[in-house]
Amino acid sequence: MPHYDEVQTPLDLFRMFITEDILSNIVDQTNLNAMRKKNLALKLSLEELRRFLGVQMLMSILKLPAIRMYWENGIRYSPVADTMSRDRFISLRSFFHICDDTLMIPKGEVGHDKLFKIRILYDAFRENLKKIDPEEIQSIDEQMIPFKGRIGFRQYLKDKPHSWGVKVFTRAGISGIVYDIEIYTGKGAVEISELGQGTDVVLRLVENLPRFMNFKLFFDNFYTGIDLIHKLRVEYGIESCGTIRSNRMRGAVLDTDANMKKKGRGSVDFRFERHSEVSV
């Protein structure tokens, strides 16, 4: 498995995050799922799983209205059709599995995990993200994984390019490379501290960043608070900046919008809090 600095191709990058151990687990669980559901010896191999995943990726790039159309005469798409038969692809798709369902704690019981179905993959992927050397300048924001199927924590964010889907809190670098993620599974899934949900998310996502290495972090007004900016600097050695909501300014009174407009474009007003050493 290559180090991030040694990555030469997209396949190298894929193998860095989706390792042989992850793929082997999917092979085992998919074969087990077919046997439990249909008493079927699926005989999925590691090599066939790679081809199956490749076909899935191609389908996400060249999209047709129906899966069967990739194999139909006249519109047949060779990179897909020559890799795997239609019936085999549909069979693998229906039995594809990541976890052992017999180990899942039922909904409503203590310890139930909304992400159980993907937990092994999710945790391994997050762990593999740590292999990338972090950039100095990073940001934290929400990102949507497009999804309109049935799921208990599907979200709607009207201002995102994909409004419906799974909301993911993301820490990324100025290059666009992602360094950590946290899937949002709805209210009550994680206990919120007195600092607030936004602050809690930021602190969890920077937990793996080396301390006092002069990182710079940016975020929007969902996260920004004076206590957060002070805590990041004092306890983590991270300088941060973000837009802030008026009810989080702890009494810092700035010039009115009307006066600022009279002063013209480029005018600035600020306040400095001595205790936290934070400027607003």
Image: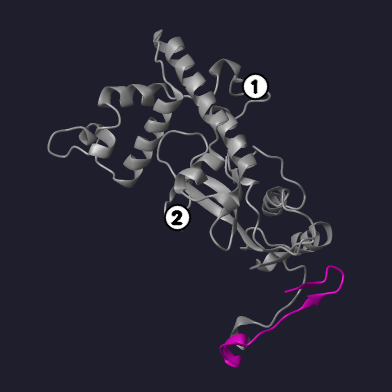
Query: In this figure, which residue is indicated by the disc labeled 2?
Result: 158
Colour option used = one colour
Q: Is residue 22 magenta?
A: no
Compared with 48, 133 (above or below) is below
- Alpha-carbon neighbours of circle 1 within 10 Å: few (<14), some, or many (≥20)? few
Is residue 215 left or right of 51 when viewed as pictured? Answer: right
Query: The magenta stretch spans which residues?
Result: 260-280
Compared with 147, 234 (above or below) is below
Residue 46 in the image: state x and y as whole percent. Answer: 46, 25
Residue 18 in the image: state x and y as whole percent. Answer: 53, 37
Q: Is residue 266 magenta?
A: yes
Disc with the residue nearer the chain's start (1 vs 2): 1
- How would you classify the magenta stretch by its main secondary structure? loop
Q: Secondary structure at mark 1?
A: loop
Q: Which quadrant, please, contains the C terminus?
A: bottom right
State the CA–CA distance, disc 1 to disc 2: 33 Å
**Residue at figure coordinates x 21%, y 35% from the top left:** 69
Q: Quadrant of residue 141?
A: bottom right
Residue 187 seen from this side: no
**Residue at figure coordinates x 42%, y 56% from the top left:** 161
Marks 1/2 in contact by CB < 8 Å: the verdict is no
Which residue in the rendered view is the most extreme toward the right?
Answer: 275
Viewer-side residue, 29 vs 278: 29
Query: In this figure, which residue is indicated by the disc labeled 1?
Result: 109
Q: Amino acid at mark 2?
A: Lys
Is residue 224 left or right of 25 when viewed as pictured? Answer: right
Count of numbered circles in the view: 2
Residue 54 seen from this side: yes
Q: Secondary structure at mark 2?
A: loop
Is residue 93 left or right of 72 when viewed as pictured? Answer: right
Compared with 47, 189 (above or below) is below
